[in-house]
Amino acid sequence: MAGKRRVVVTGLGIAAPTGIGIEPFWDALIEKRHGIRRIEAFDPSGLAAQVGGELPSFALGDHIPKSYRKSAKVMSRDIKIAMVCAYHAVKDAGLDTKCIIERGEANGPPNLDSRRFGANIGAGLICADLDELAGALATAADDNRRFSLTRWGAEGMSNLTPLWLLKFLPNMLACHVTIVHDAQAPSNTITCAEASSHLAIGEAFRTIARGDADVCICGGAESKINPMAIARPLLWGRLNTEDNDVPERASRPFGARRRGMVVAEGGGLVILESLDHARERGAKIYAEIVGFGAGADTNSWSTPNPKGAGTALALRKALADAGTTAERIDLVTPLGTGTVEHDATEMAAWNKAFGAQLDHVPAITSRGAIGNNGAGSGAIDFAATVVALHRNTVPPSPNTDDLDSGCRFRFVQGHPIDANITQAISVGYALAGTQSAALVIRRHQE
């Protein structure tokens, strides 16, 4: 893109099972702490998979203005997670948005133009609150205790609040975030499962680069800690059902004895700015985004292409967009779901795009510690990559001590290592779909 503006990362807001906020999350990575345990949000004993990555407790009221707290009643868990991430992102970036000003936490007058503040947020298929839905469904049963559409229309629906549906529309994450923080520039929602965050960050990168916004809040969030969210991958045979008694070992990305993925919740929203805007307000700069690539694979909506064609295409396009090559990348961040077929497919994609270079660069995956965060996975991975580059430190990757013979990633074991990182690349892809996306991040230099 000729004449495009440079885009930098100035804020990171993370909510992961191992910590909320970028510093607690990073500390947990360095200390190799686990966030997977037996599910506590509901009784999982009736399910074959009973462990997951749940967030530490948080109070939504600590992350939104007092005047907006009534809106919490129309927020699903996914929306609340996005609101927490948004607050931490703007605080970390030092942006005095409408939310920060109304909370009395601003350092001065607004330091951004809301008309030039955009949003791109990834979301998943938000699961309904079963307690609330079951109560309404019970009133729609006929005399034989079978569901009746007639009674549902006449009685069942009246037992749901008029705004009930607004909890579960994927675009409501971006809706609430943009209202609270007064982001008036282009706003988009992307629902492409685990690829959502990378695609959202990539779209925000493009929006700023072409001059349609100066600042964007972007990333993704999702909660898979719900019986319905667990039932679907269970039916596909993708969840680990054999390690309920050892949750800390349940998620083993690229492991020789991996038994499937572990569901989790969480996500991240990050602040991207044009370099000029960041300089003007004296913002700290973590890194610069220099390349974005996306790809799709029409092999199957449910089964990954064993050759990893779509993901390989995304990696190659990101490298080309950055004007770099695999040989000049110093750190790689794969997704690493822990399922046999998806890990093998991803490995094939990296082999296609990187070849022998994989033998010479360190890698990061947090899936072993936090599980699969759905649409929020990519933002968490992106943040980990950015901080690793910013601090020249590669954290250890839990549960990567016994890798599959075909895995060529050089995950760090034990203690973090110092590394001279100039360029890094992170990738995400949808398990139930065809989309893939990759981002190239570079150490910021004037």
Image (cartoon, rainbow, N blue to C red):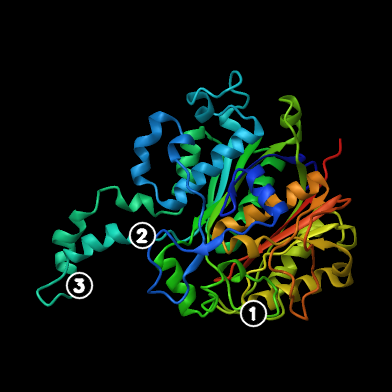
Q: Which of 401 and 292 is in front in this view?
A: 401
Q: Which of 354 and 136 is in front in this view?
A: 136
Q: Quick check: 30 left or right of 172?
A: right
Q: Which of marks 1 and 2 is nearer the N terminus?
A: 2
The residue labelled by disc 2 is 128
Label 3–label 1 contact, CB within 8 A: no
Instruction: Name the residue at 51% across, 46% down.
Output: 82
Q: Which of marks 3 and 2 is nearer the N terminus?
A: 2
Callout 3, which amino acid? Phe
Quadrant of the image occupied by residue 404: bottom right
Label 1–label 2 contact, CB within 8 A: no
Q: Which of 56 and 178 is in front in this view?
A: 56
Q: How far apart are marks 1 and 2 (CA)?
A: 30 Å
Residue 165, numbered circle = none
Label 3–label 2 contact, CB within 8 A: no
Residue 340, numbered circle = 1
Query: Label 3: few (<14), some or many (≥20) within 10 Å?
Result: some
The residue labelled by disc 3 is 147
Q: Earlier in the sequence, mark 3 or mark 1?
A: 3
Callout 1, which amino acid? Val
Percent of width and height locating residue 369: 63, 61
* Residue 387 appears anywhere in the view: yes
Percent of width and height locating residue 60: 44, 40
